[in-house]
Image (spheres, rainbow, N blue to C red):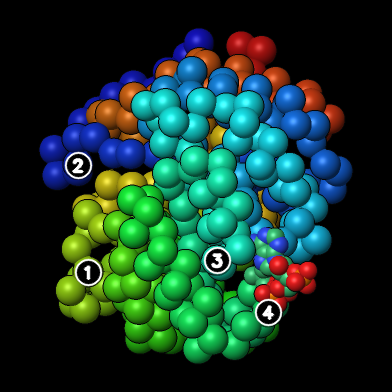
Amino acid sequence: MRQPQPVRDESLPSQVTIYEVGPRDGLQNEQTVVPLDTKAEFIRRLVAAGLPIVEATSFVHPKWVPQLADAAELIDLVDHEGPVPMPVLVPNERGLDRALEKGVKHIAIFGSATETFARRNLNRALDEQFAMFEPTVRRAREAGLDVRAYVSMCFGDPWEGEVPVDQVVTVGKRLFDLGASQLSLGDTIGVGTAHQVTALLHAFDAAGLAKESLAVHFHDTYGQALSNAYAALQAGITTFDASAGGLGGCPYAESATGNLATEDLVWLLHGLGVRTGVDLTALVGTSAWMAEQLGRPSPSRVVAALAGA
Ligand code: HMG
Ligand code: MG
């Protein structure tokens, strides 16, 4: 299969981690519920394609996200204690209990930088979300779990419009300081642009959050995800969230579409001579297979160009 021609830029990190969110962010927004075995096979194929971390599912309220109501059964079907970490989303202590019952070792809490999205996604006011997360993270850490924190609506909110950088940094730091090992900055509705990314990353740097502790999570609604990822790479970020085939979106965020496609990101990174450990051929094969299961073509440009090639 065709590969990009690597031309190394020595100013960039030589290796990065791709945090695969397809099985969770990708499938949570599907119109129909994907069969359990298909989800498990998707995760196994992603691992086989070399993704170093694969977010598997969510222990949220099953009525809020029916597509992932089978989280406990799915965990039983995948090698979540193997060498590739498989984090799950956990919003509260009830979700943590369900995850602990299954022996899950990596969780992710997900906060909002805006009031409206906190209410819509978590049924909590902005300030109340911390009271929900605090005991969840404390107990998770006591049980030896690794905790990632997401902050959503970092670059714009469909109800509130522009989101002040200070607000994003304050909420993000507060979530991280609960005891997370990483903070992932979400462009939930894909409106951000490259220099906005640079400015936000500088603001976190100025607030004392090391870039090694940050990840970026771009949705591609306005076609900016790849250039935003490049801006983050130039700013020294080394963890990038992406979704195989560009699946995804948040059911509680108006106009949220798919995540940055993992294949598009891998094409860029390998072209820049940045190592990812991902086998692009196997990954494209996985997304082409998943597109067949979902009954529609992948939105990824790289998958479209290479599938069947
Ligand atoms: P709530 O209704 O306020 O919950 O929902 P509650 O605490 O009042 O509890 C009500 C009932 O729900 C209780 O049962 C609980 O036990 C039960 P009852 O006593 O009435 O029988 N319950 C649960 N059951 C199973 N699992 C649970 C759970 N929690 C409570 N975890 C809640 C609050 C947070 C649960 C709800 O709002 C929720 O599940 N929200 C999740 C929404 C979601 O998953 N959104 C998508 C993920 S976020 C995203 O995509 C953005 C991201 O990709 C980054 C980006 O792009 O920016 C991460
Ligand atoms: Mg997302």
Q: Nearer the viewer, mark 2 or mark 1?
A: 1
Q: Nearer the viewer, mark 2 or mark 4?
A: 4
Q: Residue at x 52, y 76 (%)?
A: 132
* Mark 1 Cα shell of 10 Å, populated few (<14), some (14-19), many (≥20): many
**Do labels 2 and 1 touch, CB within 8 Å?**
no
In three-dimensional space, the C-alpha distance between marks 4 and 1, rounded to whole angstroms, equals: 28 Å
The residue tagged 2 is 13
Question: Is residue 12 positioned above or below 79 on the image?
Answer: below
Residue positioned 41% across, 86% down in the render? 167
Depth-wise, is mark 3 or mark 4 nearer the camera? 3
The residues bearing labels 2 and 4 have C-alpha atoms spaced at a distance of: 39 Å
| Distance from Cα at disc 2 to Cα at disc 1 | 18 Å
Mark 3–mark 4 contact, CB under 8 Å? no
Is ligand 1 closer than 8 angstroms to the Cβ of mark 4? Answer: yes
The reply to whether discs 2 and 4 touch (Cβ–Cβ < 8 Å) is no
Which label's residue is closer to the chain start, 2 or 4? Answer: 2
Q: Position of residue 217 (x, y in %)?
A: 46, 55
Identify the amino acid type marked 2.
Pro
Nearer mark to the viewer, of 4 and 1: 4
Ligand 1 is within 8 Å of the C-beta of the residue at disc 2: no
Residue 273 placement (x, y as % from top left) = 25, 29
Question: Mark 2 vs mark 1: which is more N-terminal?
Answer: 2
Say which amino acid is labelled 3: Glu
Which circle marks residue 41 in the picture? none
Q: Earlier in the sequence, mark 2 or mark 3?
A: 2
In the picture of the structure, the residue carrying the numbered disc 1 is 209
**What's the residue type where badge 1 is placed?**
Leu
Q: CA distance from mark 2 to mark 3?
A: 37 Å
Q: Is residue 297 above or below residue 128?
A: above
The residue identified by callout 3 is 93
